[in-house]
Amino acid sequence: MIAGPVTDTVVLIIPARNEELSLPAVLARIPAAVTRVLVIDNGSTDATASVARCAGAEVVYEPAPGYGAACLAGLAVLRKDPPAVIAFADADGSDGVENLPLLLDMLGEGNLDLALARRMPENAEALSVQQRFGNWLATRLIRLFWGHAYEDLGPLRAISWESLERLNMSDRTFGWTVEMQIRALKAGLRVAELPLPYRSRITGRSKISRTLSGVMRAGWKILWVIGREALSAHPGSPARQGPEQGK
C-alpha cells in the first residue's frame, strides 16, 4: 500500500461490494503515483470496509447499490478538496491497477484529458463472450453517432479533475463508463486508449458479467445511455484524438 503524506494530487476511487478477499491484493498493487485511495463500500455485507481501512485506504459508504452511485459518492467527498487527477479501478483485481502510471504519464504529457485502459485479456476467461459482444456493439454505436473509434469500455481510467467536472456525470448504475466516454466526446475532451493486460478476477465470480440477469441489465442500460446521449444536446466539439488512438 502507498506510504507517505497525502497530497491529493492523484486520487484513486475503487467501488467495492463484498470484495474482502480480493481487496488486499488490489490495494497492495497500487503504485506510489497514487496519493490517496478511496474505497467506496457499496452496501457490502462482508468485511470489505475493515479490510480496506486496515490496508490504509479511506472508506466511503454508499449503501445504494450501483457502480455509478459508488463513484458519485467518492466524487462528492473529493469536491471539498479536489485533486488534480482522478482515477478509477475495479476492486476484483482484474484491472492491473499497477499499470496506472502509464495512464497518468499520458495525462502528464499535457495533450490528453482522459486516458483509458483498453483491456487485453490474458486468458479467455478474463472477458466473457457477452462482455466482448457488448463492447463491440457499444463502441460501434459510439462510432456511428460521434465518429470516434473507441475499442473498449473498460473501468481502468484516469481523467483530470477539471475535465471530469465538465461532464456532469449522473449515471448511478451500469452506464457510468459509457456515459463518461460519450460525454468526453461531446465536451471535446482529448481522449486516448492504451492497451493494457487484463486478468481474471482474483477470487469469486463477477456479480454482473457471469450472470444472465446481470449481463441483460448491464447491456440494456449501456444501450439506453447511448440512446439518451444521442438525443440530448451535444456540447463542445468532436473529441480530438490523442496518442495511441489514431483511427
Image (cartoon, helix red, strand yellow):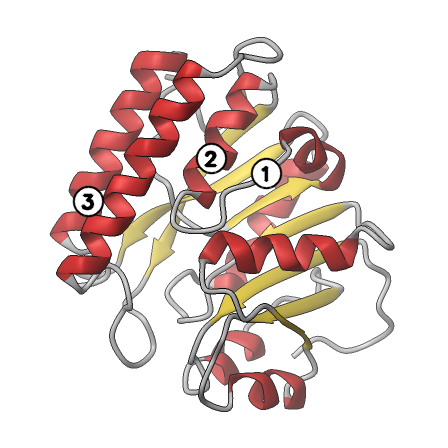
C-alpha separation, residue under disc 2 versus residue under disc 1: 7 Å
Pick whichever of labels 3 and 2 is earlier in the sequence.
3
* Mark 2 in CB contact with mark 1 (< 8 angstroms): yes
Give the quarter of the figure containing the N terminus.
bottom right
Quarter where residue 76 is shown:
bottom right
C-alpha separation, residue under disc 1 versus residue under disc 3: 25 Å
Residue at the image point whose x is 22% and y is 33% from the top: 136
Q: Is residue 222 left or right of residue 238?
A: left
The residue sitting at the top extreme is 237
Q: Which residue is mark 2?
A: 179
As drawn, 134 above or below 138: below
Q: Which residue is mark 3?
A: 132
Per the image, label 2 sits on a secondary structure element best described as: helix
Q: Is residue 219 left or right of residue 241?
A: left
Could you classify mark 2 by the number of other residues whose Cα lies within 10 Å: few (under 14), some (14-19), or many (20 or more)?
Answer: many
Q: Disc 1 or disc 3, which is closer to the eye?
A: 1
Q: Which residue is mark 1?
A: 169
Quarter where residue 142 is shown:
top left
* Percent position of residue 191, x then y: 54, 27
C-alpha separation, residue under disc 3 versus residue under disc 2: 18 Å
- Can residue 105 be seen? yes
As drawn, 141 above or below 1: above
Please name the amino acid that badge 2 sits on: Glu
Quarter where residue 167 is shown:
top right
Per the image, label 3 sits on a secondary structure element best described as: helix
Give the quarter of the figure containing the C terminus.
top left
